[in-house]
Each structure stands twice: as C-alpha cells, then as structure tokens.
Amino acid sequence: MAIAYSGGVDSTLLLSVAKEVLGPTELVAVTAAAPIFAEDETGFSRKYCAENNITQLIVDISWEMLSKVDGFKENPKDRCYHCKRALIGMLMASTRNQRAVLARGRNWTFADGTNLDDMGDYRPGSRAITELGVISPLKEAGYTKDDIRMELKARGIEVWDKPALACLASRIPYGEDITPEKLEAIYGLETALKNAGFTQVRVRHHGTVARLELLQSEMARVLEPSIRVKILEAGRTAGFTFVSLDLKGYEKGSLNQ
C-alpha cells in the first residue's frame, strides 16, 4: 500500500495501522512537498517515517507545476477538485516510477486518510479521490476525527491532539487568485501565531486584511499587550496592512459559507 502522507493525525493513524498489518516492506508513505503545504508539516512527516522505519517518497512539486494545473490559480469553487486530482496523480505517478526500488516492481494500492467527518463539509476534492481509484480505509471503517484521536492516544502516538490541518490555499476566498506571495504571507503569520502559543489557527487572506480565526478559549490572549504587539508586527512583516480577529472563532471550512 502507498499512503498519501501529510503528517496530520488522519494519515498518521492510517500509516501506523498499515505498518502493523502489512509490515515495512509492503508499505510506502508518499508525501507532497509543495508551496500550498506548511514546511513544518512536511518536516514532521520525515521525522515520523524515519523514527518508525517507514519508507518515504518525497515528491517535490514546484509553484511552476501547480500553476499549470487548470483551475488552480484562478481559485474557482471547485479548485480543490482540480488541485487534488493533479497532486494525487503526481504522487501516484512517482510511486509507479519507483516500483522497482520500493518492492520488486509490485503494483501499489493507493490510500488516503479521509475520514467520516470529511463527508459533512463541502469537499470537491473527494470526487478526484474517487475518480483516481484511491481508497479511504478510515472512512470505510466509519472512523470520525474523534475516533482517530482516541486511537492515536491509545497507541501512545504524541500527535493525537495535533490541530487540524488544511492546505494554505484554503485560506484564500474563492474567486481570488492564488499567488506564491499570498501563500507565504499566510504561512508566515500562522507560524508567528503558533510560536506565540496559539494552537488551532487560521489566517484568512482578504487582500490587505488578515482575518484571524482562533479557538474561542484562546481569544482573550490576543489583547494581552505584548502578544498584541507581536501579532501586529508579524502581520505587517507578512505584508498585511490590517490584522483583525474573527469573533466567531475558528471554524472548519468557514470560507465555504
């Protein structure tokens, strides 16, 4: 089995179970290193695979490659479909090209970490997964995000409470062009917020305005003088003129509204 491995909780559980069932010689983690993914998450995936003796294939996907994907830069409402179909296609092609090295030329079943909760949101990318023949064992087993976290905790895997991940492009409203500069600005400010101790963060890109979505339990910290100054400085360093706090707080897929 080849597993699309992002370093998030879903694919980490799938990888852990697959190693137990299949053994290391029948398993490969395939990770996309692309501008739409946070660099620290790619770094975590490398660390996890190295520590657990799991073969990992890193596929470098440049901005130039992404920009050639129809329906990506223009960011239409079904952008995730076009992007995911292209990315998963590249991962599958890279895996096929490595078959002789990975396991004596065998064919690979390709899987991802989609879970049952993912079906409750607008997910155009799920159509691409189906069309490409990718299987989703966690979804088929009826696992929700809470189930996955509980299982990871029971296994003693430290990322059980890791915040939910999403590609950086999902922070840009539909219809507004995706650019490398916007992705860098989002990642820079989100990194600063995490370094300041905030856990679940989203920086929604609205031109000159950064709209922060934080956990409601952490909102009050924003008004602490030293924290507020750091956030403003980080926002300006990232290229934003204004930094605002969304009083509703973090909400999965809020731009789908």
Image: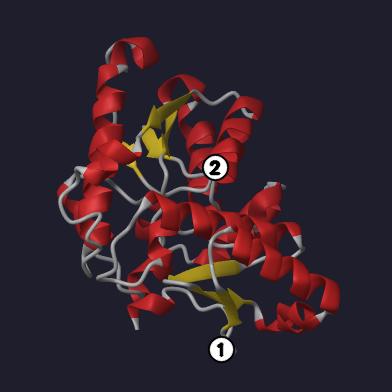
Q: What element does badge 2 sit on? A: helix
Reply above or below: 25 against 201. above
Given the image, on which type of amino acid does mark 2 rest?
Glu
Query: Which of the two discs, 1 and 2, labels the residue nearer the N terminus?
Result: 2
Q: Name the residue under label 1.
A: 248
Reply above or below: 164 against 91. below
Local packing at callout 1 (Cα closer than 10 Å; few below 14, some 14-19, many 20+) is: few
Q: What element does badge 1 sit on? A: loop
- Quarter placement of the C terminus: bottom left
Given the image, on which type of amino acid does mark 1 rest?
Lys
Please state the horizontal and vertical placement of residue 163, each as a whole percent of the image. 61, 62
Please state the horizontal and vertical placement of residue 23, each as a whole percent of the image. 50, 25
Farthest bottom residue?
247
Q: Camera-side residue: 251 or 235?
A: 235
- Quarter placement of the N terminus: top left
Seen in the image, is 224 located left or right of residue 40? right
Q: Mark 2 points at which residue?
A: 39
Q: In which quarter of the image is residue 94?
A: top left
Rounded to the nearest angstrom, the CA distance separating label 1 from label 2 is 28 Å
Please state the horizontal and vertical placement of residue 177, each as a whole percent of the image. 28, 62
Mark 1 and 2 residues: CB-CB less than 8 Å, in contact?
A: no
